[in-house]
Amino acid sequence: MEFENKIMLYGLAVIPLLLLVFYAYVAWRKKALAKMGDQHLLEQLMNRTSMKRKWIKFSLLLAACAFIILGLANLRLGSKKQKVKGESAEVMICFDVSNSMLAEDVKPNRLAQAKLSTAQLIEKLASNKIGLIVFAGESYVQMPLTSDSRAALMYLNNINTGTIANQGTAIGSALETAIMAFDNGGEKDSKKGKAIIIITDGESHDDNAEAMAKEAADNDIKIITLGVGTPTGAPIPVRKGNTVNGFKKDREGNVILTKLNEKMLQQLATEADGVYMNLNGGKKVVQDVYEQIDALDKTADDTYQFTEYANHFQLFLGIGLFLLTLEFFMSDKKPKWLEKVNLFDEKK
């Protein structure tokens, strides 16, 4: 059990504050009426006013606010993390976050399409150990190897082109970082299969890429390259908010056209007995990559299995809106037909 949007729970702190404000209002009102004259006469003039009804209305309002806040926080139940015996491989996903990934030759842009396909791939490979590396002009491990696919999805969601300030497409650096990540976080002296998945447009790359691909092959690490974009290419938009203000230009003032470099990505994959695929293939590509990973040698180890969360925000929002409606239609004055009936022994 957990709340998806825990920050919303801070809104519950407003409820005791509102209670104090209302209590102060009641105390002020009582003193103000006492200064106006004879209390018995005032009670006769205000014979339909009911402080109990005011308290009931206010209590309904507070309860409605509490339930609505809980609804917005979204209570999720039913998640279960179980340790199970399973067979897994080790997969490092290298994700390109260079500015060229903002090109819109695929919709909505290369970065968004790559993140969507990567999320589907992570879910498909949930039984394996997955790590995440981001790269542009340099690279670093965003998430080390783990069997927690939910953590991988969380890290993936936070990736953007501002993750790395140094721009470029240092695929060689990404490969080197991935190989080191296997040494630091993977299983040593095991027959567990290893693979590096590179998701990039390959628009420009460092000269070290081919050498690192050969080193990966020497370490029995398979390389799968996934290209995003089109060979015809597109300019890189410069945005201010949701508005495109222009396109990136080179030093001579010419608009930069970024193209998918499929030839280079095919060569890298070939160096390490891997394959190249274009993400335009959608779910078929995800399935093909899964089959490539599934064919790797695997070893038995402890993995974690998760059941899906069931969202319960609808229940809380429903109760909150019902209480809010009840409060809205409830009068703080006693109905005329009850003027002679005093079931609660109210002091009018």
Image (spheres, grey):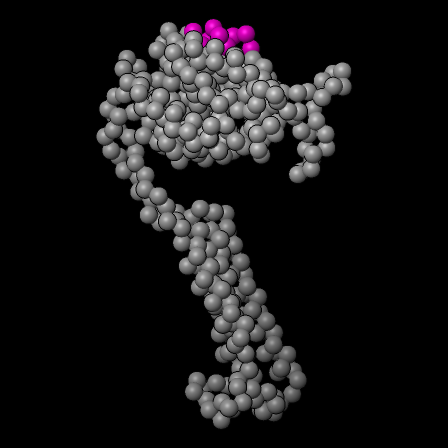
- The percent position of residue 73, horizontal first and vertical second, equals 47, 51
Bounds of the magenta segment: 206-214
Q: Work out whether residue 215 can be spotted.
A: yes
Q: Work out whether residue 136 can be spotted.
A: no
Q: Is residue 240 left or right of residue 97?
A: right
> Which residue is depicted at the point 28% across and 30% down?
303
Which quadrant of the figure has residue 258? top right
Q: Residue furthest right?
A: 253
> Which residue is depicted at the point 49% across and 53% down?
72
Image: 239 above or below 225: below
Q: How many marks?
A: 0
- The percent position of residue 168, horizontal first and vertical second, equals 59, 17
> Which residue is depicted at the point 42% across and 48% down?
3
Q: Residue furthest bottom?
A: 340
> Which residue is depicted at the point 47% across and 47% down?
5
Image: 207 above or below 339: above
- The percent position of residue 289, horizontal first and vertical second, equals 39, 24
Whether 211 is among the magenta residues is yes
- Front in this rendered view, residue 29 or 173: 173
Q: Is residue 5 left or right of residue 24?
A: left
Which quadrant of the figure has residue 32? bottom right
Image: 14 above or below 143: below
Whether 265 is among the magenta residues is no
Which quadrant of the figure has residue 48? bottom right
Q: Main secondary structure of the magenta part?
A: helix
